[in-house]
Structures are given as structure tokens and as C-alpha cells.
Amino acid sequence: MAKKPENLSFEESLAELERIVAELEQGDVSLDDALKQFERGINLVRNSQAKLEQAQQKVAILLKPDENAPLSPYVIEGE
């Protein structure tokens, strides 16, 4: 049984999406199986987008200047 999309890493989701696309492009899949694969792909994409948004938020938080951080003088090496 396949893992739920929310339990996959971003990389695992991407790899599975690539596999699904390759299978669907070959055209050897029945209509019912193609619809199931398409639905799985949509769920994988939505979960991957959510993970990317979370990562972007973390980066934005980490890059935000800390106004409470103490200032330190800039020292040029060799002086």
C-alpha cells in the first residue's frame, strides 16, 4: 500500500509524481487506473506545495533581522 502523501518527504513525492507522469504518458493505463493515478498525483502536488510554503516561511523567519540582537562592531581582518 502506498504511503499517504503527507507522510512522504518532498523528494519522495517528486519521485512518485515523475513515475505517475511517465506511466500516464505511455498511455498503457486503463481509464480507471489513470483516474486513480491522476487523483494520487493531485494529492502529491498539493502536499508538496504545502511543504514548499512551510519551507519558505521558515526561511523568511530565519532571514528576518532580530531587532533584539546586540550590535557588534565590524572588524576588518588584518587591522
Image (cartoon, helix red, strand yellow):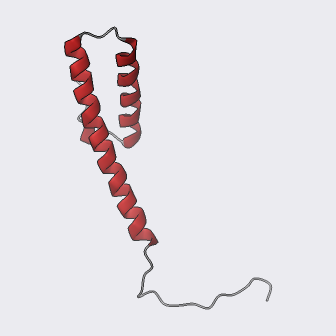
Q: Position of residue 29 (x, y in %)?
A: 29, 11
Query: In which quadrant is the N terminus drawn?
Result: top left
User: Vertical placement of 18 versus 72: above or below?
Assistant: above
The picture quadrant where one finds residue 16 is: top left
Point 38% across, 63% down: residue: 58
User: Vertical placement of 57 versus 23: above or below?
Assistant: below
Q: Position of residue 3 (x, y in %)?
A: 25, 32
Say left or right for 40 vs 73. Answer: left
Point 24% across, 36% down: residue: 43
Q: Is residue 45 visible?
A: yes
User: Vertical placement of 22 versus 47: above or below?
Assistant: above
In this view, the residue in front, 44 or 34, is 34
Q: Is residue 7 visible?
A: no
Q: Residue furthest right?
A: 78
Point 69% across, 87% down: residue: 75
Say left or right for 22 vs 50. Answer: right
Say left or right for 57 vs 76. Answer: left
The picture quadrant where one finds residue 56 is: bottom left
In this view, the residue in front, 61 or 30, is 30
Q: Position of residue 71 (x, y in %)?
A: 53, 90
